[in-house]
Image (cartoon, rainbow, N blue to C red):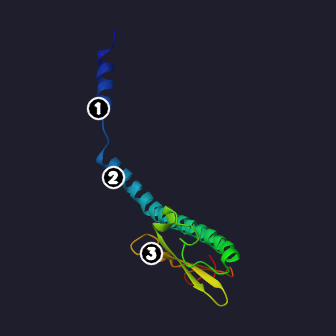
Amino acid sequence: MEDPIRKYAIRKFAARGFSLIELMVTVAIVAIIAVVAIPSYQSHVVKGNRAAAQSFMLDVENREKQYLLDARSYASTLGTLGMTAPADVSRYYTITIDVVATPPSFTITAAPIAGTQQESDGNLTLTSSGAKTHGASTTW
């Protein structure tokens, strides 16, 4: 047999909810965490997208050097090299190859697409001599 007073106390305790102040404190804590975490997360996403573009540009550079050995000139398009930009790169960057015939040289440029989160990141360039730039910086 159960004690009726105990049964009433359990039911009253179970029906108790959160106070408005407790809810407001929780919302404030979540808002503070969001204000700090979201910009940091977005920064890491931009760096990750940049790293994917840089890796692809290095692959293009390698393919260009192989193409030079076969054709005695550099290719001016990715299609000529038999390459296409992967989805994680083409979504944020436009990859172009500028070729100079004499002396043979090339510059691979990854320009951020307007309207994407990479827009403010600046252009990435890689030359046939190995020089790498990122925006105004002389290195990646």
| Mark 3 residue type | Glu
Give the quarter of the image for residue 67: bottom right
Badge 1 is on which residue? 15
First in sequence: mark 2 vs mark 3 = 2
Taking depth in this image into account, of 75 and 50 the one nearest to the observer is 75
Q: Residues within 10 Å of mark 1 (few under 14, many from 20)?
A: few
Per the image, label 2 sits on a secondary structure element best described as helix
Badge 3 is on which residue? 119
Give the quarter of the image for residue 80: bottom right
Q: Position of residue 81 (x, y in %)?
A: 59, 71
Taking depth in this image into account, of 22 and 6 the one nearest to the observer is 22
| Mark 2 residue type | Met
Q: Quadrant of the N terminus?
A: top left
Q: Position of residue 15 (x, y in %)?
A: 29, 32
Per the image, label 1 sits on a secondary structure element best described as loop
| Mark 1 residue type | Ala
Taking depth in this image into account, of 110 and 71 the one nearest to the observer is 71
Q: Nearer the viewer, mark 2 or mark 3?
A: 3
Q: Residues within 10 Å of mark 2 (few under 14, many from 20)?
A: few
State left or right for residue 5 relative to residue 32: left
* In the depicted structure, whether residue 128 falls above or below residue 87: below
Q: Residue furthest bottom?
A: 102
Residue 24: mark in rendering: 2
Q: Position of residue 6 (x, y in %)?
A: 33, 20
Please give the name of the residue rendered at 48% of the width and 62% of the height, measured from the top-left corner.
Answer: 87
Per the image, label 3 sits on a secondary structure element best described as helix
